[in-house]
């Protein structure tokens, strides 16, 4: 017979459930945002990566997304046509071309600004110390996620549409 869960185990279970719920809601929000601005989910992830990484080569963007070079070229083409990115010469090596994120289009600014304002208001309910703790928690999560992504990519896990 197993012993009842400890308060810490219960707290971790509740945190796990809440994190999963947040992930689901975030994915749904991103799906709606992509439809709103006229791109697909992969394109949105490319834009997010460009926000975090800054200008990168198409090869680096392919590496970060797990896409083939052909698929990333198509994504960059769509984003360039939509006015979200541009290809520019790398200022450090003029032989290379990098993909650079452009400013939000005016018609998209309002929705993203609203999301940002809601985020800032939510953060205002926490002390600086609490925000630092949350940031530490999330930053410590990233390496594990990246390791798991690399591990699953090496195992050639089939895409989600083929798993069901």
Image (spheres, rainbow, N blue to C red):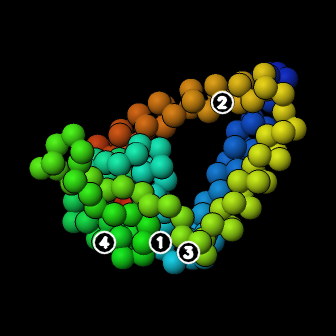
- Dot 3: what SS? helix
Residue 61 in percent (x, y) is at 32, 51
The mark lying in front, picked from 3 and 2, is: 3
Q: Specify the label residue 135 is tagged with.
A: 2
Relative to residue 82, is residue 29 depicted above or below?
A: above
Name the N-terminal-most of marks 3 and 2. 3
Residue 84: image quadrant is bottom left
Residue 91: image quadrant is top left
Between 160 and 70, the one lying in front of the other is 70
**Cα–Cα span, label 4 and label 1:** 13 Å
Q: Which residue is mark 4?
A: 77
Between 75 and 24, the one lying in front of the other is 75
**Cα–Cα span, label 3 and label 1:** 9 Å
Residue 95 in percent (x, y) is at 12, 50
Q: Which residue is mark 1?
A: 40
Lateral position of residue 93 relative to residue 54, left or right: left
Q: Which residue is mark 3?
A: 37
**Cα–Cα span, label 4 and label 2:** 34 Å
- CB contact under 8 Å: marks 1 and 2: no
Q: Residue at x 44, y 50 (%)?
A: 49
Q: Residue at x 21, y 40 (%)?
A: 92
Residue 162 in percent (x, y) is at 40, 67
Relative to residue 89, is residue 85 depicted above or below?
A: below
Residue 158 in percent (x, y) is at 35, 58
**Alpha-carbon neighbours of circle 3 within 10 Å: few (<14), some, or many (≥20)?**
some
Query: Which residue is situated farthest in the left direction here?
Result: 95
Name the N-terminal-most of marks 4 and 2. 4
**Alpha-carbon neighbours of circle 2 within 10 Å: few (<14), some, or many (≥20)?**
few
Relative to residue 105, is residue 154 depicted above or below?
A: above
- CB contact under 8 Å: marks 4 and 2: no
């Amino acid at each position: 017979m197993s012993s009842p869960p400890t308060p810490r185990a219960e707290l971790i279970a509740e945190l796990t459930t809440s994190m999963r719920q947040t992930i689901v809601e975030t994915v749904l929000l991103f799906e709606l945002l992509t439809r709103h601005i006229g791109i697909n989910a992969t394109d949105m992830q490319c834009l997010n990566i460009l926000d975090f990484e800054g200008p990168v080569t198409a090869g680096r963007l392919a590496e970060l997304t797990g896409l083939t070079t052909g698929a990333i070229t198509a994504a960059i083409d769509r984003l360039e046509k939509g006015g979200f990115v541009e290809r520019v010469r790398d200022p450090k090596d003029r032989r290379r071309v990098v993909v650079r994120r452009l400013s939000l289009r005016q018609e998209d600014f309002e929705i993203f600004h609203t999301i940002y304002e809601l985020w800032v208001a939510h953060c205002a309910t926490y002390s600086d110390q609490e925000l630092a703790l949350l940031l530490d928690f999330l930053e410590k999560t990233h390496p594990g996620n990246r390791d798991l992504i690399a591990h699953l990519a090496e195992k050639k896990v089939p895409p989600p549409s083929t798993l069901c």
